[in-house]
Amino acid sequence: MIELYTSPTPNGYKVSIMLEETGLDYEIHQIDLGKQEQKSPEFMAMNPNGRIPVIVDHDNDDFVVFESGAILIYLAEKAGMLIPAGEKARSQVFQWLMFQLGGVGPMMGQANVWYRYFEEQIPAAIHRYQHEGQRLLTVLDRRLTGRDYLCDEYSIADIATWPWAVTHKWSGIDIEGLVNLQAWLNRMAERPAVAKGRNIPARASKRDTREAGQSIIVR
């Protein structure tokens, strides 16, 4: 059994989508970010950085994994899927995973902060991060020319990138003309595991009235 500590954010969705794709049994613990539950001593004991998501693998001596990219790799290796075996193909998946972790996520996250959340509107900051976010999505669009997925076969690179790229409107980023990216966003959304995983933990919070921090078992 995998315990997933998560919230309804792009980084959180990566892991719930991954768990749905692998078919591994898991239990959800919804962390209320507004109440700063991710800064509690109990949570910080699992992730000293105080960020979601975190998993605990009770089938592997209660092994704890934090950082969304590390979790995707761990689950892929545990399930034996979504990372190719070949040396070059495996490297390509890791390259595009790192592209998301070091580029798409941080830049779009900053675009969200300056465009949506920061009290003072600073046009230069907003433009800087929206422009860089759009540039990175354009890189993805070029990569997807003639491909259904980022590395030909569906992989953790797609799972990591989609939850961020699909939020482009929230970041104030225009993807008009990026037809390959648009097709990929739709293709990903049609996958049952993606559709289901994107509603976790939001789906769980609607299904019952438990306090955040309690859990439900999936599957």
Image (spheres, rainbow, N blue to C red):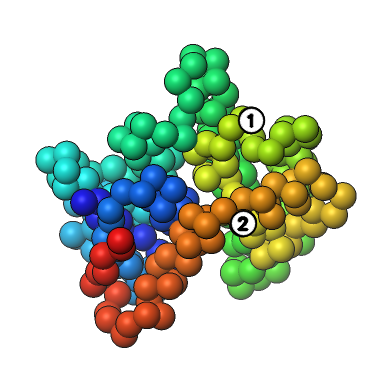
Comparing 120 with 53, the one in front is: 53
- The percent position of residue 149, horizontal first and vertical second, equals 64, 37
Q: Callout 2: helix, strand or loop?
A: helix
The furthest residue to the right: 177
Which residue type does callout 1 highlight?
A: Asp
- The percent position of residue 12, horizontal first and vertical second, equals 43, 56
Where is mark 1, residue-wise?
Answer: 152
The furthest residue to the left: 61
Q: Quadrant of the C terminus?
A: bottom left
Q: Which mark is residue 189?
A: 2
Q: Residues within 10 Å of mark 2 (few under 14, many from 20)?
A: some
Q: Residue at x 16, y 47 (%)?
A: 58
Comparing 29 with 145, the one in front is: 145
Q: Residue at x 75, y 57 (%)?
A: 173
- The percent position of residue 134, horizontal first and vertical second, equals 75, 48
Q: Quadrant of residue 151?
A: top right
Q: Is residue 50 left or right of residue 169?
A: left
Q: Residues within 10 Å of mark 1 (few under 14, many from 20)?
A: few
First in sequence: mark 1 or mark 2? 1
Q: Which mark is residue 53?
A: none
Comparing 210 with 79, the one in front is: 79
